[in-house]
């Protein structure tokens, strides 16, 4: 397997800078996820690593080899980089069987027939398609076609596997299933994986480490999924990793008041100083009680039953926040609120940010 090192890489298209002096290192054998909004440069970076594009500045190393270096003009061709790649749209040949699709890279490489068959069948079985090797893609589900693409990328025994949003075209259940399959394949083969996506659930679910990239192509935070989720570097990272509530507070005489109200914060003291602060929290961090209990007063503006949970939209000091409570807990504790009901809100976990941050748009 191999590591990847990106050193101060820049890329422009026309007059627009996509990446500017970006540096990133992937360890040998890890599953690394690059997470960011559409258009931030994730796929551009993947294409630079793959050799489909040349950097305008900086260099890219795979293992100890510089496969791209803008200063010297060094540019190793894609087929000499030891890479496998899977795209969002599967890109399987419709007129070829599963076997022929998977075997295609080996045929191009002139691999002997016996070895070609054994390696191809091994990869077909590895991705859970045993017995389907004679089928055409039209006879397969979307998830099975994506497995064909994975097997084809793995059959050449690449040092690195590049995955460009490969699960986007699958339904929710298949995405979840394939997410686990990809992680299992990585653990089984030991291949280094770089997975780019804008889906935070996939990123958190499969990554050994992840990086969050903003819309300007800047890396905002790198770390283990738990670390980035629980200790975001800033409000952008917090907002990007799931549904985010932001509730502004102001400090007067050592007391924090919510919004423009006189409702005081009674929870643990914030970890930041300043006259203006914002509490960031997830819907699952919200604890509700009936009017008269502890916590900040709120009014339920929307109540939605989503099966396993109730989703509430609550107004606190003029700010709308979302709360998610397990349905069984709502029933057992008498927390079935209707629109217009008064409630009390406490927070189990809070990330404090300096200044006042605009409320999230995912209400």
Image (tube, helix red, strand yellow):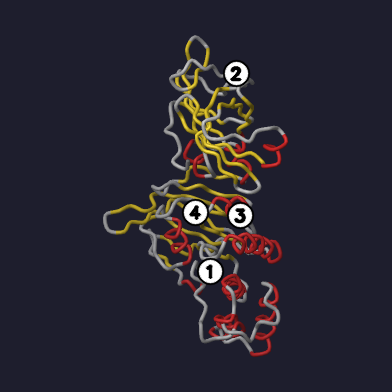
Q: Residue at x 68, y 81 (%)?
A: 121
Find the distance from the CA under tag 1 to the CA under tag 4: 16 Å
- Asked whether the beta carbons under mark 1 and mark 3 sit within 8 Å of each other, the answer is no
Residue 132 versus residue 76: which sits nearer the camera? 132
The mark found on residue 86 in the picture is 1
Q: Nearer the viewer, mark 1 or mark 3?
A: 1
Q: Nearer the viewer, mark 3 or mark 2?
A: 2
Instruction: Look at the picture and state if 240 lies above or below 151.
Output: above
Residue in front for this viewpoint, 129 or 64: 129
Work out whether 312 lies above or below 251: below
Q: Mark 4 or 2, which is nearer the eye?
A: 2
Residue 189: image x %, image y %? Answer: 68, 66
On the picture, is 237 further left or further right than 134?
A: left
Which callout, 1 or 4, points to the residue nearer the camera?
4
Q: Earlier in the sequence, mark 1 or mark 3?
A: 3
Q: Residue at left 66%, top 82%? A: 132
In the picture of the structure, the residue carrying the numbered disc 3 is: 27
Dot 1 alpha-carbon crowd within 10 angstroms: few under 14, some 14 to 19, many 20 or more: many
Given this view, does label 3 or label 4 mark the residue nearer the observer?
A: 4
For marks 1 and 2 on the same chain, the one whose residue lies earlier in the sequence: 1
Residue at the extreme bottom of the image, as rendered: 113
Q: Position of residue 252 (x, y in %)?
A: 47, 12
Which residue has dot 4 on it? 198
Which numbered marker is on residue 266?
Answer: 2
Q: Which of the two discs, 4 and 2, labels the residue nearer the N terminus?
A: 4
């Amino acid at each position: 397997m191999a590591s990847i090192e990106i050193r101060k890489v820049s890329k422009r298209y026309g007059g627009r800078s996509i990446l500017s002096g970006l540096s990133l290192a992937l360890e040998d054998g890890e599953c690394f996820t690059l997470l960011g909004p559409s258009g931030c440069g994730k796929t551009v970076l993947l294409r630079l690593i793959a050799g489909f594009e040349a950097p305008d500045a900086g260099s890219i190393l795979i293992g100890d080899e510089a496969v791209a270096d803008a200063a010297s003009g060094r540019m190793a061709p894609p087929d000499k980089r030891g890479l496998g790649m899977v795209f969002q749209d599967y890109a399987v040949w419709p007129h070829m069987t599963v076997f022929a699709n998977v075997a295609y890279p080996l045929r191009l490489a002139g691999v002997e027939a016996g070895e070609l068959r054994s390696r191809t069948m091994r990869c077909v079985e590895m991705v859970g398609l045993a017995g389907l090797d004679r089928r055409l893609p039209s006879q397969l589900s979307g998830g099975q076609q994506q497995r064909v693409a994975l097997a084809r990328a793995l059959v050449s025994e690449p040092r690195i596997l590049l995955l460009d949003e490969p699960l986007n075209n699958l339904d929710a259940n298949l995405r979840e299933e394939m997410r686990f399959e990809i992680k299992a394949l990585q653990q089984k083969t030991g291949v280094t994986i770089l997975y780019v996506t804008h889906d935070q659930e996939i990123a958190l679910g499969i990554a050994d480490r992840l990086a969050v990239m903003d819309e300007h192509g800047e890396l905002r935070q790198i770390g283990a999924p738990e670390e980035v989720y629980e200790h975001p570097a800033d409000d952008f990272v917090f907002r990007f990793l799931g549904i985010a509530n932001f509730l502004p507070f102001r400090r007067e005489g050592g007391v924090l008041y919510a919004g423009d109200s006189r409702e005081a914060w009674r929870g643990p003291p914030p970890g930041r100083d300043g006259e203006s602060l914002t509490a960031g929290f997830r819907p699952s961090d919200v604890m509700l009680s009936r009017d008269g209990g502890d916590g900040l007063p709120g009014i339920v503006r929307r109540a939605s039953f989503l099966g396993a949970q109730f989703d509430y939209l609550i107004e606190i000091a003029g700010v709308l926040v979302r709360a998610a409570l397990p349905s069984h807990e709502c029933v057992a504790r008498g927390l079935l609120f209707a629109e217009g009901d008064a409630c009390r809100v406490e927070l189990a976990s809070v990330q404090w940010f300096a200044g006042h941050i605009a409320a999230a748009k995912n209400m």
